[in-house]
Amino acid sequence: MAENRGGYDMIYLDYQATTPLAPEAKAAMLHWLDGPEGEGFANPHSPHRMGRRAAAAVEVAREQVAGLFPPGGRIIFTSGATESINLAIRGSAGDADSPVLASAIEHAAVLDTARDAGPYAIWPVDAEGLILPVPPIEAAPRMVAVMQVNNEIGTVQPIGRAAELARKHGALLLVDAVQAAGRMTIAEGDLIAVSAHKLHGPKGIGALWMKDGVTLDPVITGGGQEGAVRSGTLSPAMCAGFGAAASLALERMEEDAAHVERLWQAARDLFSDWTLNSSAQDRWHGNLNLRRDGLDVNRLMSEVRDVAFSAGSACASGSGRTSHVLKAIGLSDVEARNSIRLGFGRYTSLDDIETAAAAINRAAREQTA
């Protein structure tokens, strides 16, 4: 990762957990942390000149982030995708007794929130992680929640299938586009959640896109700063960083995708004796989830200390739980625990992939020989 290693002594292959901050995003943030003219600290919700300048920066960022999404909606800034998902599920609940229908491989932010907010049902997936053609539902859902690109196995879902089911039942379609935003065209939905730090922006800020005509009850109440839907003072610096990252991602989308494809092909060759989890085709190729029989992943991670990679979803690491995603595609507990996830992208070099593969393969062979 020669371009953006920033002095770190590790090869970073955990892009699904978070992405390196783009220099352009950092520069946009520093402009509002240091200025202009020492006024960058201003509250964007204040009516005076300093506040109006800060508010203008927020609106520029809002337009930049909106460029990621389909036309015909509005951006609500949040603290991240988890809050966006909570706002979508809880804010649309009302007094309805109808369930949220979520795919079996959704992020915990969807599954745990749906479980806590009321009735929910699971849409099973096949061995490649794709939602089945027809879900086994007992009651018409009020919401269908399907992530566009899975964070653990990279599966790209047929969102059109979910949209058709949602329309049939008059339900809202919630799309978790965290792993898709900035990498591909975001699928259309009624509510779409993204997070800045997954597309080379800062942590601590995300967005919920709301289709025109969709209404939500506030989950965080107070000043109603974000269109009376979400309360809290916005950070112009965070918004500016998010906006710059989004704008850059759109500008570089084709270039980044071509770079990732080259890295994918090289990695597939270098790990040819490992088993690929999920589909090779219907996935984002910046996600390589692999398994090897007899592998002790914790030992592997300890022995390959110069490479940052994951044993599964970063959000569940250390929990001791077997990945619900890998189990949903039919892997046994043992197979799931024999699996690793490598994530790469814009700032990963071919040399990074080759060096990391050599170290991981060497340590794995020593274990399983």
Image: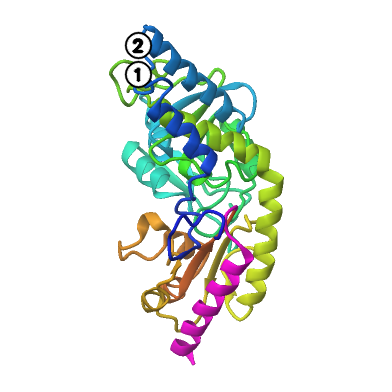
Name the residue rendered at 64%, 29% in the picture: 70
Q: Is residue 315 above or below residue 34?
A: below
| Crowd tier of the residue under label 1, counting other residues whose Cα lies within 10 Å: few below 14, some 14–19, many 20 or above | many
Colour approach in the figure: rainbow
Mark 1 element type? loop
Residue 237: image x %, image y %? 42, 29
Which residue appears at 63% of the width and 50% of the height? Answer: 133
In the image, residue 291 lies in the stretch drawn in magenta = no
Badge number at residue 79: none
Q: In which quarter of the image is residue 73?
A: top right
Secondary element under disc 2, as helix, strand or loop, is loop
User: In which quadrant of the rendered image does the N terminus lie?
Assistant: bottom right
Q: How many numbered marks, from 0 up?
A: 2
Q: Name the residue under label 1.
A: 42
| Amino acid type of the residue tagged 1 in the rendering | Ala
Our reading of the magenta stretch's main secondary structure is: helix
Q: Between 2 and 315, which is closer to the camera in this rendering?
A: 2
In the picture of the structure, the residue carrying the numbered disc 2 is: 46
Along the viewing direction, whichever of 150 and 324 lies nearer the viewer: 150
Is residue 351 a member of the stretch shown in magenta? yes
Q: Which residue range is magenta in the image?
A: 346-369
Is 205 positioned to the left or the right of 348 in the image? left
